[in-house]
Image (spheres, rainbow, N blue to C red):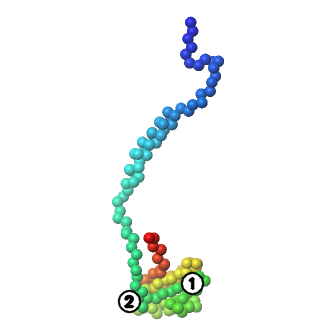
Amino acid sequence: MAMGVGPSVDDEEVVSTINTTPLVDVMLVLLIIFLITIPVVTTSIPVQLPKERNEIRETKPENITLSVDKDGRIYWNELRMDSTIALIDRLKKIAVLTPQPEVQIRGDGGAEYAGVGRIIYACQRAGIAKVGFITEPPPRST
């Protein structure tokens, strides 16, 4: 007497089901790895970060406002400066005052950086210690 255990050689059926056991095993291993590594990633060196604050600066009459328009022309308040050398000469006269006034730069949003760079270069050459930038505050979200 013969007994048939398993598929016979004559029956060559294709098994179309997916074995999900290896998939579940891999997913459980990945879950365990992520659960172990997440606390290590989130803990870091404790530092106290600086707080953001918006300081409203007072415009003092002795402050100098230099402006750059979109074409790169430099203005001392309302007076157009002909060259960087003229700007340096004028700033040197201001740099010897005590206390030294602050130079505030207003640059047009569409201007190239070269105009602002010329002002910073002139301030450096003249010995101006305080240089600030005037920007438009971001819109308030309500």
Report which quarter residue 80 is drawn in.
bottom right
* Residue type at numbered disc 1: Asp
* Residue type at numbered disc 2: Pro
Which residue appears farthest toward the top when viewing the image?
1
Residue 136 place in picture, x, y as percent: 48, 78
**Residue bearing the label numbered 1:** 69
Is the residue 18 above or below the residue 120 in the image? above
Q: Which of the two residues, 26 or 44, is positioned nearer the viewer here?
A: 26
Residue 66 place in picture, x, y as percent: 50, 86
Mark 1 or 2, closer to the camera: 1
Left or right of 44 in this view: 89: right
Residue that appears at 43% across and 46% down: 34
Secondary structure under the numbered disc 1 in the rendered image: loop
Report which quarter residue 55 is drawn in.
bottom left
Q: Which of the two residues, 81 or 34, is positioned nearer the viewer here?
A: 34
Residue that appears at 56% across and 6% down: 1
CA distance separating discs 1 and 2: 29 Å
Is the residue 44 above or below the residue 104 in the image? above
**Would you say residue 114 is visible in this rendering?**
no
Quadrant location, the C terminus: bottom left
Residue 135 place in picture, x, y as percent: 48, 79
Check contact, mark 1 vs mark 2: CB within 8 A.
no
Q: Which of the two residues, 11 or 64, is positioned nearer the viewer here?
A: 11
**Residue bearing the label numbered 2:** 99
